[in-house]
Image (cartoon, rainbow, N blue to C red):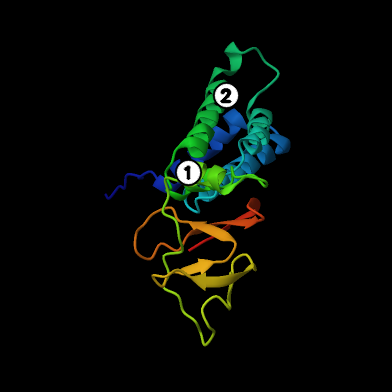
Amino acid sequence: MNSSIPHPDPSAEFFGSLASLRKVFVRSPMQFLAIYGGCFALAAFAFYENVWGTPVEWWLYVPLIVLFAVGLLRRQSLLEQRSRILALIALMAAMAVIHTAPLNGLKPFLRNLYSIQPGMTEVDVRRIMGQYPEGTGWPVIYGGNPPGTGTLNDLGTGDAYAAGSTPDGELTLNDSIVFRPSAEPGDSNWGIVTFKDGKVTGVSFSHD
């Protein structure tokens, strides 16, 4: 007589565990939306901060904390919801790491770049950005135009810059200073600071 011993289904156990966690932390559709909306936003912030390298303003994390608090906390005593409070603290710690950890080299560069304010002088700008290589790092390509008469169009931002060249043949942007995060060959991430009458009028970033 043959008999078979049933084996547990790993996928069923996994989804059963998720369902159990949902019962512990989520009791209403509003809480469900708050938690999963917060998770989606936090994942997007993590991508922008540490993959794309674009800093997210610190105050944008405050609504996330509110969302997670709405989703996790109950009208109970603190002792009765210790696990939910610990989960909220863990999420807040994750936000702090995402926002402050320099996991992408562009993040500190962009923080410094975007700290430049209109009206600053070249001395002020170089005091902030002096640790970074200056210049486009590109050889000038005239495209049939005499030096200093060409126009460079940034396809990412839509901005157009009058182009020139240094005596060494490096491409320059007239009335602008260009900074790069590193001096590595091929690094075309440009922080562009534009001036008029010796004062900053604009700051932009052209991604590689």
In the foreground, 156 or 133: 133
Give the residue drawn at x 34%, y 59%.
184
Query: Is residue 108 rendered to the left or right of residue 26?
Result: left
Circle 2: residue type: Arg
Give the residue drawn at x 61%, y 57%.
194
Q: Position of residue 207 (x, y in %)?
A: 52, 61
Q: Position of residue 148 (x, y in %)?
A: 55, 75
Residue lying at the far right of the rendered structure: 30
In the foreground, 123 or 116: 123
- When the figure is inspected, residue 185 is found, relative to residue 179, above or below; the finding is below
At mark 2, the secondary structure is helix
In the foreground, 152 or 21: 152
- When the figure is inspected, residue 5 is found, relative to residue 20, above or below; the finding is below
Circle 1: residue type: Pro
Q: Position of residue 83 (x, y in %)?
A: 53, 22
Residue ID for mark 1: 108
- Regarding residue 203, the answer to whether it shows in the image is yes
Q: Nearer the viewer, mark 2 or mark 1?
A: 1
Residue lying at the far bottom of the rendered structure: 144
- When the figure is inspected, residue 164 is found, relative to residue 92, above or below; the finding is below
Give the residue drawn at x 63%, y 28%.
72
Q: Indicate the quadrant where residue 120 lies.
A: top right
At mark 1, the secondary structure is helix
Residue ID for mark 2: 84
- Regarding residue 9, the answer to whether it shows in the image is no
Compute the Cα span from label 2 to label 1.
34 Å
Give the residue drawn at x 71%, y 18%.
75
- When the figure is inspected, residue 77 is found, relative to residue 37, above or below; the finding is above
- The 10 Å Cα crowd at callout 1, few under 14, some 14 to 19, many 20 or more, is some
